[in-house]
Amino acid sequence: MSSPRSMVTYHAKARGLALLEVLVAMAIALMVMYAALGTLLISRGATAQVQELAQLQQQASYAMHLIGLQIRQAGAVDPVRDEDSGLYAFPAPGTDVDAGPKVFGTEGRDGASDTVTLSFAPVRWPNPAARAAWQYDCIGARVENDERVQARFAIDTRRSSLVCRSLRGSQPVIGQVVDLQVRYRVVTAGVTRELDANQVEAAALWPSVMALEVCLDLKGEERAPDSAALRYRDCSDRERPRDGRVHQVIRHLFHLRNA
């Protein structure tokens, strides 16, 4: 049998942790958990912003591609075949399909977004009823051979989206767009100038527009706490706060093929 002395020694060695030791262990565990949680949140925020930036870049590229298609074709008139001679010739200016300016825009007031309208004649295929000859406008609506194709790009401020309006209706092109700015390259008397829509309109220089500089400002939805104080330059080259969100500003210069 064990002696009373050995029993006391055993119980002294087998006693549990003191309250102070438990509290210290809990504090250390909480510190480790908070550090891990902070790292996780920072990593998640950075990953979300990178993914959102990639998405904004993809959307901006698609929008610029669509706008560029309309700009490059602006003013295009398809030649018409003369049934008697069998020769092709461009229709006389002033006909229905050639009526109106190929490029027209409006300047936003007090820094608001601009609008730009582009129009051109569709290609006249020999057999327009065949599916292979079907043509479409910026909203995907079918355009007849004798119709004028028109695309008006503007910002829907309520939905933060870029909208294209054709003669058949309108629909959003991409979302998360907060600004659209357009500048016009005009050539007169051998001199190239960069003007806004008001200046072009005042001088009646729409027929002299040779190129358009288009800028889009896209804004992300993910909020990053550590970037609230950061700033960026918008389409008007003004420094503005990011408000804790990613901004993707993209601009392209498009030349009119039919200028």
Image: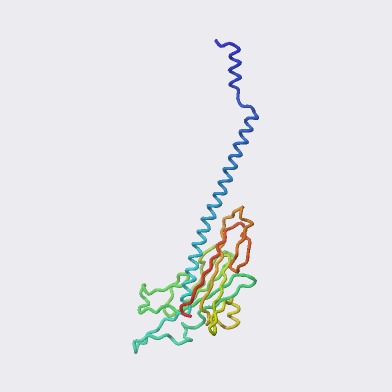
Horizontal side, residue 133 vs residue 233: left or right? left
Horizontal side, residue 98 vs residue 133: left or right? right
Instruction: Name the quadrant of the N terminus.
Output: top right
Q: Residue at x 64, y 27 (%)?
A: 18
The furthest residue to the bottom: 84
Question: Which image quadrant is residue 241 in?
Answer: bottom right
Residue 167 seen anywhere in this rendered image of the structure: no
| Camera-side residue of 203 and 159 | 203
Number of residue marks: 0
Question: Which image quadrant is residue 81 in?
Answer: bottom left
| Camera-side residue of 87 and 131 | 87
Q: Residue at x 57, y 70 (%)?
A: 181
Q: Residue at x 62, y 31 (%)?
A: 22
Residue 157 x/y as whole percent: 59, 66
Residue 252 seen anywhere in this rendered image of the structure: yes
| Camera-side residue of 92 and 207 | 207
Check the image and report above or below for 181 versus 230: below
| Camera-side residue of 91 and 212 | 212
Residue 163 x/y as whole percent: 53, 68
What colouring does the structure picture have?
A: rainbow
Check the image and report above or below for 250 versus 125: above
Residue 188 x/y as whole percent: 54, 83
